[in-house]
């Protein structure tokens, strides 16, 4: 993908000159196995005018071959927008993220016709920062996270201080502050009210505190190839940890990005129809054909990677309109 500038938006929105802070996807071949996905039900709209327009766009999305698809991908403006996952109590989780992890509540929305609500939280404006999108499905108060999802990484100035705040607010500390084994970086692990794990890393004055998401995969080289070719990410580094019987790699979009599970990661694109075709070409399984999202009309497409991790690609112009 083309290296994104610190985008004030996507598509029709002008790009600024400063680079977006780097965020990463950490892939691991730990023995825990591949993720088991449960999918948020999404449906295409059915009005005739919209269907005809979508058909015209799909017809123009065909590539002659892999080289042409890769060339288009390099020109596409992609940026990780937010990670989407499900929680059992929206207000309780918002309280934990704002009071313990220092995030800000950016916006909320309720979609009663689809029976779910969202809250968006993060450390900066959504038009230039990676954010968390919490989803509450009406009547569902608990989820099985599974063994595939690893953890989020958050950079802070003082790990010990953050851990004490989490503890004081009733949060669960699963790893006390201290240097990572074989290194000097001070880390700790905590859990949110739904059991999602957060690695707290001591990174003073980091421009993007929400800095990585770790996923477990069954074949590291296969996963790296998919994210490089289908999603346009760059391999930043690899490491092997034989004492833990795992190896891992960091992947990021050229401007830097992250990835996730237990629902999905959202990535901006200039054209969801062309993106879906590229993803299919390089091994992605399209589980939600390109089209507008009911109740919002933002165009998206959803795919599964070779290990079953779900990503949603969101039309840049439509996403910018959501933020207006």
Image (cartoon, rainbow, N blue to C red):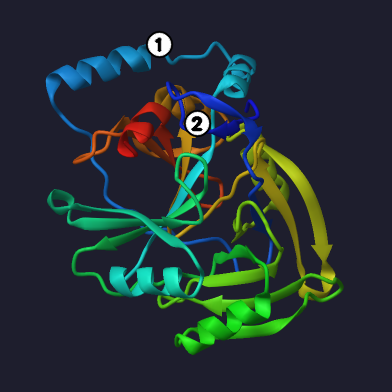
Q: Secondary structure at mark 2?
A: helix
Compare marks 2 and 1 and give the one earlier in the sequence.
1
Label 2 Cα crowd, 10 Å radius (few <14 / some 14-19 / many 20+): some
Q: Is residue 31 visible?
A: no
Task: Label 1, secondary structure: give it.
Answer: loop
Q: Would residue 36 appear left or right of 209 to someone viewing this image?
A: left
Compared to 314, does 222 lie above or below? below
- Whether residue 242 is visible here, answered yes or no, is yes
Compared with residue 38, is residue 229 higher up or lower down, i.e. above or below?
above
| Residue for badge 2 | 280
Q: Quadrant of residue 56?
A: top left
Residue plotted at (60% across, 14% down): 68
Image quarter of the C terminus: top left
Q: CA distance from mark 2 to mark 1?
A: 16 Å
The residue located at (56%, 61%) in the rendering is: 34
Residue 75: x and y in percent read 59, 20
- Please tell me which residue is depicted at 79% across the width and 49% down the height of the picture: 237
Percent of width and height locating residue 3: 65, 29
Q: Residue at x 51, y 56 (%)?
A: 123
The residue wearing badge 1 is 60
| Residue 308 horizontal/vertical position (percent) | 50, 52
The quarter of the displayed image where residue 180 is located = bottom right
- Front residue of 206/257: it is 206
From this view, report whether residue 76 is shown above or below residue 170. Answer: above
Instruction: Please identify, in this view, whether the residue under mark 2 or under mark 1 is nearer the observer.
Output: 1
Q: Which mark is residue 292?
A: none
Q: Nearer the viewer, residue 279 or 168?
A: 168
In x, y percent, where is residue 182?
87, 73
Query: Tag count in the figure?
Result: 2
Quick one: quadrant of the N terminus? top right
Q: Residues within 10 Å of mark 1 (few under 14, many from 20)?
A: few
Q: Depth check: 181 or 302 in front? A: 181
């Amino acid at each position: 993908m083309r290296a994104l500038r610190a985008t004030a938006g996507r598509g029709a929105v002008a790009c600024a000159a400063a680079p977006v802070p780097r965020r990463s996807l950490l892939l691991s071949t730990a023995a825990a196995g591949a993720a088991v996905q449960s999918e948020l039900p999404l449906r295409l709209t059915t009005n005739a005018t919209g269907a005809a327009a979508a058909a015209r766009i799909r017809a123009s999305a065909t590539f002659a071959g892999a080289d042409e698809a890769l060339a288009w991908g390099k020109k596409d403006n992609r940026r990780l927008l937010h990670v989407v996952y499900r929680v059992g109590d929206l207000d309780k989780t918002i309280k934990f993220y704002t009071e313990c992890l220092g995030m800000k509540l950016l916006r909320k929305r309720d979609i009663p016709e689809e029976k779910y609500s969202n809250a968006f939280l993060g450390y900066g404006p959504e038009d230039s920062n990676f954010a968390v999108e919490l989803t509450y499905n009406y009547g569902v108060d608990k989820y099985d996270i599974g063994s595939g999802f690893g953890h989020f990484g958050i950079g802070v100035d003082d790990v010990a201080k953050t851990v004490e705040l989490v503890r004081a607010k009733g949060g669960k500390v699963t790893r006390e502050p201290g240097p990572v084994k074989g290194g000097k970086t001070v880390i700790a692990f905590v859990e949110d009210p739904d059991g999602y794990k957060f690695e707290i890393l001591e990174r003073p004055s980091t421009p993007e505190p929400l800095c990585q998401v770790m996923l477990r995969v069954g074949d590291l080289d296969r996963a790296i190839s998919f994210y490089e070719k289908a999603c346009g990410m760059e391999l930043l580094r690899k490491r092997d940890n034989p004492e833990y019987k795992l190896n891992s790699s960091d992947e990021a979009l050229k401007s830097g990005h992250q990835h996730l599970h237990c629902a999905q990661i959202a990535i901006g694109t200039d054209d969801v129809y062309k993106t879906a075709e590229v993803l299919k070409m390089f091994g992605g399984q399209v589980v939600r054909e390109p089209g507008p999202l009911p109740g919002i009309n933002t165009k998206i497409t959803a795919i599964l990677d070779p290990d079953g991790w779900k990503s949603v690609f969101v039309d840049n112009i439509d996403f910018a309109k959501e933020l207006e």
